[in-house]
């Protein structure tokens, strides 16, 4: 691969249940801190059966936006913009002309403006008001997060939201990677955002009967399902040449992207779809299975995902699977749906950068059907030169990114 | 047959995936070709029908091992309905 086609990460931003900046998020991931706790952000939470979630705490919109702007900014857009600003600042990037015209803003979102939807439906159906807030539509439209990032950061290139449920952010970052690699854009600000801890969404997840009552214990014996999360993570992707020319601090290199569809069950995971996505990412990266040391797993903590993902890892990595460190950071930040892949990609980039595999916390012991090394409960310092970040969505949509240490 | 039994049978009959004209109390759940999402949907239908709450987590409960036959399900629902009345 010539330098022209190499794509590097030069900035990261994160708004998470473990902290409101990338540094705090990553430090807490390494410490094995749980971001899961009693639901605080839903006024009628007492009525819910589900008592815990991984919420973003201490986020004050007025610290980041003028009061008048908030009538157009759902929490999902607020998270996206704050994370994008941090990523751009972290990259030391000045968005001027003509860079503005050549910079993409691509954001993954699974559910979108759920808070706005809930608030306005409550007005209509509970309070029997006849009017909703005037800017309800542009506030909750599915593309709002990408539009707000574009407007507020001055990005005038390709901008849109990618929706593929729990793989949205990974698809968004993958598409951005392709655009930068092909030379279609000079820069991309990309990731994912979700703000789905709302009454209606939690009720919806309750109805599926897949949530754990207390903790998310991926790959562990006694795991009881997923915990809903929220947040955003964004990153700056640039061609290596450009990053070098401006003396940017290079955090890592995105080297491969694989995406597949199961064309099978709506919710049940599929070994074939998962495996082909991982193989696709490896092939795109021109890496062999033996080159990978760390997997940031999809690892939702459901009975079905964790067994199926383990089986797929065995199939793709063969004997090398036993040597992999495989962890699920969802054990700490819950499942942030459309943002999950971005939170996990930030974790993966930092893992490769710092040579640390973050842990799978809440791990009680091995499930015979999940027999890999899941980095239980404590982070591990280890040489990491390349890693994968897996996302496998409802609807049978799979996306995998490959990251390499920059050298 | 009790009213609960005929209602539960009607709910299960809607979801069965085998070509069998009638669902009977002695039918085994696994012989009706029910899948995991079917269980979640049937439990919802039963909860709505009888206004009861059935604790069920798809990760930790397995209806196919906890209940063998349609009759077992009916017995469990009759118990919940009786508890609700008392």
Image (cartoon, helix red, strand yellow):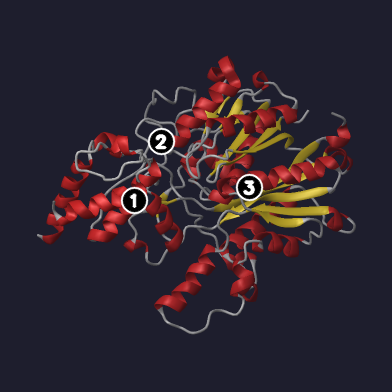
- The image shows residue A47, relative to residue A374, as above or below, that is below
Measure the C-alpha gap from mark 3 to mark 1: 38 Å
For image coordinates 71% across by 30% down, the residue present is A404
Is label 1 in a helix, a strand or a loop? helix
Distance Cα–Cα, label 1 vs label 2 = 26 Å
Can you identify the residue that label 2 sits on? A303
Mark 1 and mark 2 on one chain: no
Neighbor class of circle 3 (other Cα within 10 Å; few <14, some 14-19, many 20+) is many
Residue A184 is left or right of residue A354, and the answer is: right
Query: Whole-percent x and y of residue A29?
Result: 53, 39
Quadrant of the rendered structure where residue A157 is? bottom right
Question: Which part of the image, by quadrant, shows the C terminus of chain A?
Answer: top right
Classify A103 as above or below A294.
below
Could you tell me which secondary element the residue under label 2 belongs to?
A: helix
Q: Are marks 2 and 3 on the same chain?
A: yes
Would you say residue A176 is visible in this rendering? yes
Q: Which marked residue is nearer to the observer: mark 2 or mark 3? A: 2
The percent coordinates of residue A395 (x first, y second) are: 54, 46
Where is residue B25 shown, x and y percent of the image?
19, 43
- Please identify the residue farthest to the front as the structure is shown: B21
Q: Position of residue A59 (x, y in %)?
A: 54, 60
Mark 3 highlights which residue? A169
Depth check: A343 or A351 in front? A343
Q: Is residue A257 above or below residue A105?
A: above
**In the image as oriented, which residue stretches furthest toward the top?**
A319
Q: Pick whichever of labels 2 and 3 is earlier in the sequence.
A: 3
Q: Which residue extends farthest bottom?
A: A130
User: Which residue is identified by label 1?
Assistant: B14
Q: CA distance from mark 2 to mark 3?
A: 23 Å
Residue nearest the observer in this picture, A93 or B73: B73
Circles 3, 1 touching at the beta carbon (< 8 Å) = no
Q: Do the residues bearing badges 1 and 2 touch, measured as CB atoms within 8 Å? A: no
């Amino acid at each position: 691969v010539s330098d022209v086609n190499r794509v590097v990460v030069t900035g990261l931003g994160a708004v998470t249940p473990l902290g409101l900046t990338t540094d705090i998020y990553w430090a807490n991931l390494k410490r094995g801190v749980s971001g899961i706790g009693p639901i605080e952000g839903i006024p009628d939470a007492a009525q819910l059966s589900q008592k815990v979630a991984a919420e973003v705490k201490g986020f004050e919109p007025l610290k980041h936006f003028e009061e008048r702007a908030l009538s157009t900014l759902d929490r999902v857009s607020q998270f996206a913009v704050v994370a994008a600003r941090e990523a751009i600042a972290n990259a030391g990037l000045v968005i001027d002309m003509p860079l503005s015209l050549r910079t993409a803003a691509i954001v993954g979102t699974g559910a979108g403006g759920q808070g706005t939807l809930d608030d306005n439906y409550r007005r209509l159906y509970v309070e029997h008001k006849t009017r909703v807030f005037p800017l309800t539509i542009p506030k909750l439209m599915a593309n709002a997060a990408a539009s707000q990032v574009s407007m507020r950061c001055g990005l005038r290139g390709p901008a849109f939201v990618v929706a593929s449920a729990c793989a949205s952010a990974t698809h968004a970052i993958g598409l951005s990677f392709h655009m930068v690699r092909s030379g279609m854009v000079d820069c991309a600000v990309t990731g994912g955002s979700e703000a789905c801890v709302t009454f209606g969404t939690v009720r919806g997840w309750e109805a599926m009967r897949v949530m754990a009552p207390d903790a998310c214990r991926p790959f562990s014996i006694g795991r009881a399902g997923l915990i809903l999360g929220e947040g955003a993570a964004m990153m700056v992707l640039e061609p290596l040449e450009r990053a070098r020319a401006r003396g940017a601090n290079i955090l890592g290199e995105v080297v491969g992207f694989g995406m597949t569809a199961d064309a099978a069950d709506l919710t049940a995971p599929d070994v074939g779809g998962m495996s082909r996505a991982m193989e696709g990412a490896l092939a795109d990266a021109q890496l062999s299975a033996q080159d990978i040391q760390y997997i940031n797993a999809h690892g939702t903590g459901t009975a079905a995902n964790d067994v199926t993902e383990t089986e797929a890892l065995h199939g793709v990595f063969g004997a090398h699977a036993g040597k992999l460190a495989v962890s699920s950071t969802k054990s700490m930040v819950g499942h942030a749906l459309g943002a999950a892949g971005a939170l996990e990609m930030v974790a993966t980039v930092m893992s490769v950068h710092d040579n640390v595999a973050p842990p799978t916390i809440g791990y009680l012991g091995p499930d015979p059907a999940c027999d890999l090394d899941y980095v239980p409960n404590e982070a591990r310092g280890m040489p990491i030169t390349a890693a994968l970040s897996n996302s496998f969505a409802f609807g049978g949509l799979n996306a995998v990114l490959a990251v390499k240490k920059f050298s | 047959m009790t009213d609960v039994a005929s209602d539960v049978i009607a709910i299960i009959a809607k979801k069965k995936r085998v070509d069998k004209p009638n669902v009977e109390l002695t039918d085994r759940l696994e012989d009706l070709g029910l899948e995991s999402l079917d269980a979640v949907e049937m439990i919802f239908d039963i909860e709505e029908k009888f206004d009861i709450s059935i604790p069920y987590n798809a990760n930790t409960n397995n209806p196919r091992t906890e209940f063998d036959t349609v009759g077992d399900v009916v017995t469990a629902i009759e118990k919940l309905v009786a508890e609700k009345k008392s």
